[in-house]
Image (cartoon, rainbow, N blue to C red):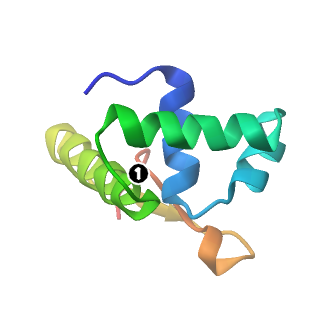
Amino acid sequence: MNLTTREETVLAFIARGMSDREIAARLAFSVSTARKHREHLLAKMQLRKSSQLTMYYLARQHELFKKAGRWPRIIHSRNASANIWNGSGAA
């Protein structure tokens, strides 16, 4: 499925467990705009729950890393729940 750059960004934030309010603050737009982006992604992918978006994102990242022949490393933050995958290094 082809996603726009903005959709990719919002999807990545959703996969990290960010709320609409957090996404809006991060991308400097309103909470209702963040909510609309989430709703649009769900409709575009014919999904019903944000957890399904997360599963899609993780499966897609897994395929990208397999094709690249390397696995991501984790970038640690002070907040353990905010740790993210980064494809720039080894596991």
Instruction: Look at the image and tell me in which quarter the N terminus lies.
Output: top left
Figure quadrant of the C terminus: bottom left
- Is 85 drawn above or below residue 32 in the view shown? below
Question: Is residue 3 shown above or below 31?
Answer: above
Left/right of residue 12 with respect to residue 78 in the rendered view = left
- Residue occupying the point 31% across, 22% down: 2
Q: Is residue 28 above or below residue 56?
A: above
Residue 4 drawn at (x, y percent): 46, 20
State left or right for residue 46 relative to residue 78.
left
Q: Position of residue 50 (x, y in %)?
A: 45, 58
Q: Position of residue 64 (x, y in %)?
A: 24, 40
Q: Residues within 10 Å of mark 1 (few under 14, many from 20)?
A: few
Q: Nearer the viewer, residue 18 or 65?
A: 18
The amino acid type found where label 1 is placed reads Gly
Residue placed most toward the observer, 1 or 32: 32
Judging depth in this view, the residue of 70 and 42 nearest the camera is 42
Q: Position of residue 21 (x, y in %)?
A: 78, 53
Return the residue at label 1: 89
